[in-house]
């Protein structure tokens, strides 16, 4: 199984991971806590927002240079590997649980980002579908990205 190509690339290069979602988007999503950062396994900074209702984190990958091909190449390491589309971009939902889901989105053929969502206590209707909500967050990130190559 090979990763689909990205027809209208967007760039994650040079964007602070905590700026991938705007303050109004964070408010709408209910991610109202101050962001925290840490390093990803591939050496970039991920940003996480955690409050009593939800945990959302966004982790860009601009360093490995393989886009979704990296995720597809590791598909056997995930539970529930499901190819999807987010705002017209190729994506994969993985590791779906009753309260959490991760979505990898190919913003270009060489870049991707991960959105991980966990419902901690929130009762909003859209929190009840963790993969759907992670895709909503991913769509918001995509809306903020500039055109890429």
Image: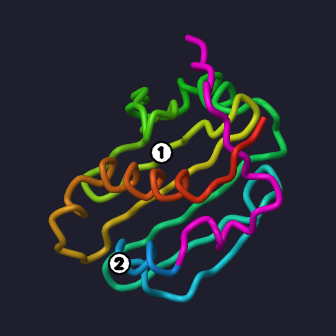
In-image side of 72 versus 94 (left or right): right
Find residue 111 and report its image quarter.
top right
Q: Which residues are magenta?
A: 1-22
Residue 56: x and y in percent read 47, 67
Q: Residues within 10 Å of mark 2 (few under 14, many from 20)?
A: some
Disc 1 is placed on an element classified as strand
Residue 86: x and y in percent read 43, 40
Label disc, if present, on residue 30 of the rendered structure? 2
Magenta stretch: includes residue 15: yes
Check disc 1 and report the residue beneath it: 103
In-image side of 38 versus 97 (left or right): right
Q: Nearer the viewer, residue 71 or 107?
A: 107
Q: Residues within 10 Å of mark 1 (few under 14, many from 20)?
A: many
Eye-nearest disc, 1 or 2 = 2
Which residue occupies 51% across, 30% down?
Answer: 90
Q: Residue furthest top?
A: 1
């Amino acid at each position: 199984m090979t990763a689909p190509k990205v027809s209208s690339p967007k760039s994650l290069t040079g964007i602070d991971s905590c700026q991938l979602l705007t303050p109004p988007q964070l408010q709408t999503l209910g991610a109202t806590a101050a962001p925290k950062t840490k390093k990803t396994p591939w050496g970039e900074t991920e940003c996480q927002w955690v409050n009593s209702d939800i945990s959302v984190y966004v982790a860009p990958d601009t360093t490995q240079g393989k886009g979704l091909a990296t995720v597809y190449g590791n598909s056997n390491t995930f539970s529930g590997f499901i190819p999807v589309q987010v705002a017209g971009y190729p994506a994969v939902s993985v590791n779906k649980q009753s309260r959490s889901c991760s979505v990898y989105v190919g913003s270009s053929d060489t870049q991707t980002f991960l959105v991980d969502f966990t419902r901690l206590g929130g009762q909003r209707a859209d929190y009840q579908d963790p993969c759907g909500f992670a895709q909503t967050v991913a769509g918001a990130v995509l809306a903020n990205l500039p055109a890429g190559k």
